[in-house]
Image (spheres, grey):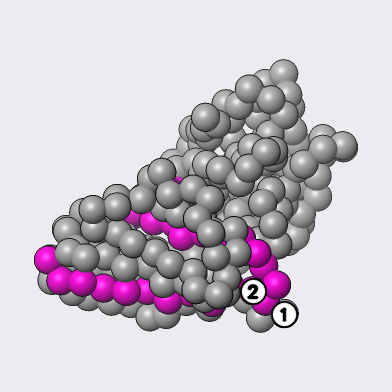
């Protein structure tokens, strides 16, 4: 089975610019997650979707971050405007349903200059 | 909310030696527990999980972990480490009624020849 696909793998932008990441989950997985992993830390959940609805976005900085999952499949995460502290790896994961193991993509490494 | 502590930031072992990575969790009920491994530049790969039943769980790549409720621990073990096991290891705890999974800060494993 194909894994979770993410693009781009790397992105370098200047602060105050905008950036978008894309994720395609494993086929049939209803639940999709976006995580932020700062260097030296474990992943932190930003937002969780069940199909195309948001289940949990309590840790998403909504003044600058947004995410959508159109048609309950692909998802995009956007940052606008970016700050220096947003430098991190952004991981997408999916699972069959809530409570099941999550499968991770390789992530997008974002560097803010 | 649940939380995870991985007391060891960095561990070095010789190839062929045994390995134990520590994980302590905090959660009011019986949790879901996971170990993930992350190689440089890649996403997280699930090594093993505990949901219920036998407290000693077997995973991929020769890893095992034991759930000890009395100690709130879920330590990862491997009897003989291979050079390819060098990576970052993350313990995670999830709640049974949702998928609010919390990760530890990780333990970096170095394998000496």
Which element type, helix, strand or loop, lies under badge 1? loop
Image coords of residue B104 (percent x, y)? 50, 41
Q: Mark 2, residues whose alpha carbon is within 10 Å: few (<14), some, or many (≥20)?
A: many
Please provide percent x and percent y for residue B34.
Answer: 66, 46
Q: Residue drawn 81% across and 50% down?
A: B58
Question: Real-space Cα distance between discs 2 and 1?
Answer: 8 Å
Q: Residue at x 23, y 53 (%)?
A: A63
Figure label count:
2
Question: Magenta span covers which residues?
Answer: A16-44
Q: In the image, is residue A55 part of the stretch drawn in magenta?
A: no
Q: Looking at the image, which is closer to me, B89 or A37?
A: A37
Query: Toward which corner of the image does residue A27 lie, by quadrant?
Result: bottom right
Label 2 or label 1, whichever lies nearer to me, is 2
First in sequence, mark 2 or 1: give its number.
1
Q: Camera-side residue: B49 or B81?
A: B49
Identify residue for label 1. Answer: A1
Mark 2 element type? loop
Q: Chain of mark 1?
A: A
- Reading the image, the residue beneath label 2 is A26
Where residue A73 appears, as percent x and y from the top left, is 57, 74
Q: Which quadrant of the rendered structure holds the C terminus of chain A?
A: bottom left
Residues indicated by labels 2 and 1 sit on the same polypeptide chain: yes
Q: Residue at x 55, y 31 (%)?
A: B2
């Amino acid at each position: 089975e194909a894994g979770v696909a993410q693009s781009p793998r790397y992105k370098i932008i200047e602060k105050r610019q905008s950036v978008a990441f894309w994720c395609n989950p494993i086929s049939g997985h209803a639940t999709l997650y976006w995580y932020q992993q700062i260097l030296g830390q474990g992943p932190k959940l930003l937002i969780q979707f069940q199909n195309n609805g948001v289940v949990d976005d309590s840790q998403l900085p909504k003044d600058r971050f947004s995410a959508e999952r159109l048609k309950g499949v692909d998802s995009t995460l956007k940052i606008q405007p970016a700050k220096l502290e947003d430098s991190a790896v952004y991981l997408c994961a999916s699972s069959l349903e809530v409570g099941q193991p999550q499968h991770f993509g390789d992530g997008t490494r974002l560097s803010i200059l | 909310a649940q939380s995870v502590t991985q007391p060891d930031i960095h561990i070095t072992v010789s190839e062929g030696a045994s390995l134990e990575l520590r994980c302590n969790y905090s959660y009011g009920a019986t949790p879901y527990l996971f170990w993930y491994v992350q190689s440089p530049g890649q996403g997280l790969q699930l090594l093993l999980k505990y949901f219920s039943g036998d407290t000693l769980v077997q995973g991929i790549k020769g890893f095992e972990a034991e759930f000890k409720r009395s100690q709130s621990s879920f330590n990862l073990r491997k009897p003989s480490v291979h050079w390819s096991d060098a990576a970052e290891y993350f313990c995670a705890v999830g709640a049974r009624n949702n998928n609010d999974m919390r990760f530890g800060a990780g333990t970096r494993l170095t394998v000496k020849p």
